[in-house]
Structure formats: C-alpha cells, structure tokens
Image (spheres, rainbow, N blue to C red):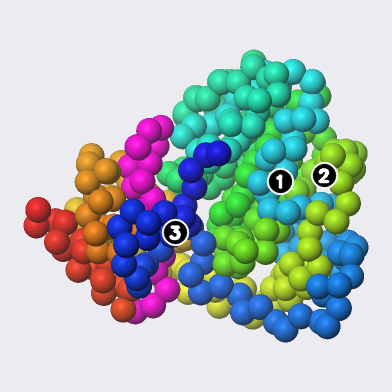
Amino acid sequence: MLEHGGNLRDAQRLYGGDGWIDLSTGINPLGYPAPPLPQDAWHRLPEADPALTEAACAWYGARALLPVAGTQAAIQALPRLRPPSRVTVAAPSYAEHAHHWAQHGHALRQIGYPMLEAAVGSSDVVVVCNPNNPTGEQIAPNLLLRWAAELGARGGWLVVDEAFGDTAPALSVAAHAGTPGLVVLRSVGKFFGLAGLRLGFVAADRALLAALADALGPWTVSGPAQHVALAALRDTAWQQAAQARLARDGARLRGMLAAHGVRASGTPLFHWWPEPRPEEFHEHMARRAIWVRLFPQAARGIRLGLPGREQDWDRIEHALQEWTKR
C-alpha cells in the first residue's frame, strides 16, 4: 500500500508523546458537526438515498452523480472499466492514480503539468488533479474541456480529480461531466472535514456511471455516512462560513511560512514547497509533536495542512522559528 498522511499512530510509534498536531493531511481541521443519527441508521441496509444525490448535484453543479465509498473507490475501479489503453497521469500528483492504472494492463506514463497538452493527442486517458495535490498547480477549465472533447471524440477519458475543488469552485468542470469523455471526482472528506465517512462522488455520463455502479456493487456507502453527508451538503450557511474561514486561515499559513523564508504553493487547505532538506524538516517538526507530510521522491518537499486551534498556530510558529535559526 502507498503511504498517506493522517498516520498519527506511526508518528506516536516512532517518536512517542501525546498532544500531536496533525498537519499531514489537507483535511479541514474544523469539519462539519455531524448531526445525531436516526435510530435505525446502524440496522437497515444502506439503500441509496435520492436526496443525497440531489443535494450533491446542487453543491457540485453536476447533472448526474454516483455516490462512492470515497473517491479512492472510483480511483481503483475506473482502470478496470477500459481495455488496455495509453494512459497519461499528471505528476507529481496523488500517487494512487498512477498506481492503479499501472495494474490493469494499461501503458502508463507520468509527465509534468506543463507537458500535458502535448500528450493529449497520443493518449486514450489523461488523469489530472485540479487543483493538484500536493503542489497546488491549476489548469484552466476551458483547457480541460477542450482536452475532454478531444479525448471523448475517440472514446477516451479525461479524469479530473477535484478532491480539493471546494475552495476553488471556479476551477470545477463538474457541470460539464454529462458528456462522454469527462469524468470528475469530488470528495466530501476534505472541505467538509468528514474523511471518516468515506464518501465521494463521481460525475460522468450516465452510461459510465451505470458501469461504475455495477463494478462497485450494492451498498457501497453506509447509511450513517449518507445521513451526515446529506446534512452537510444542504447546509449552505456552514459552507459559506467555512469557505471564508479557510481562505483566511490559508492566507495566514502562507504568510507565516513566507515570514520564515518559505515560498509555498497550494490551496487554502494545504501548502507545499520543495524544501531542500525535507527529511531534516520532517524530523525537526516530529520532535516537537507536529506531524507534517514528507514527500521524499517525486514531489520532493514538505506539505502542511491547517491547524485547528490557536495554541496550535503558536506551536507551529515557534517550531518554524527554531528551524530558521538552525
């Protein structure tokens, strides 16, 4: 299995101690407050709730969506729905995409964002994260739609992972995903801070959604997850307040890093930079019970998520001061 953030048990096993600040993910640290569950939530089979799909379509602006057990489920299933294809995955990026396309007989190549446009003509499938995780790179929607049309005309796909798209709604192409060739992945875990639900959505043409639903099988999303997500997707007041707060906190973290000589890129939910000594920085922060995400290879550098409490901001500032003085 590939390594991911959020592995606080590893941090405690390696370094000991309590009171850890987890900055290793891009998950909203002040997530949606889950409402009480109905009495039968744990006892009924989780039949699909049309109200959930309707609320998700309204929030994401999509024509049709398939709820899935986290976008990870779709990432693993989509490569099984095509014959051997020429697949181009943007890199560095979320590693699970390339990992799974490589396992099902496809011819895989990974290339940087600046070279993607030139690669569309020689690809059957192109996979991008927009905005990118971990670097924050972005691709204009009109360019993505042109690629999708070109790929769709010959039976290909453009897969756009918009897991971090809730803080950049102008980038989204989910509204256009009803036409063949465009597949969009959306996550409830990041912006809503509900990663434990394991819930995401896929926007695509209805034939592809039907094939994906058949591949994934019945009861893919738990009843409790559907209940909590429905409340979150309908709560426009919370959504608007969260977007404003994340924009402020993202700017605050970017300013804090800049004050210590770090020029970072990313989104309001995370910041990344090509730290020249990433292993040393990771160790420095871990010794202070601050868990950051180390990228030792393709996206060699450090990624920081947002802290959730004022005392956490103070501890991070102090740790950065000590790092700067080294």
Cβ atoms at labels 2 and 1 below 8 Å apart: yes
Which mark is on residue 216? 2
Q: Helix, strand or loop at disc 2?
A: helix
Q: Residue at x 14, y 61 (%)?
A: 322
- The residue pinned by badge 3 equals 9
Q: Helix, strand or loop at disc 3?
A: helix
Nearer to us in this view, 20 or 233 = 20
Q: Residue at x 23, y 39 (%)?
A: 276
- Alpha carbons under labels 2 and 1: distance apart: 8 Å
Residue 218, position in %: x, y? 88, 51
Dividing the picture into quarters, in which one does residue 210 lie?
Answer: top right
N-term mark: 3 or 1: 3
Nearer to us in this view, 225 or 158 = 225
Dividing the picture into quarters, in which one does residue 122 lie?
Answer: top right
N-term mark: 2 or 1: 1
Disc 1 marks a residue whose amino acid type is: Ala
N-term mark: 2 or 3: 3
- The residue pinned by badge 1 equals 73
Q: Residue at x 69, y 77 (%)?
A: 235
Q: Helix, strand or loop at disc 1?
A: helix
Left or right of 97 in this view: 22: left
- Alpha carbons under labels 2 and 3: distance apart: 30 Å
2 or 3: mark nearer the eye? 3
Residue 190, position in %: x, y? 57, 60
Magenta region, residue range: 292-310
Disc 2 marks a residue whose amino acid type is: Leu
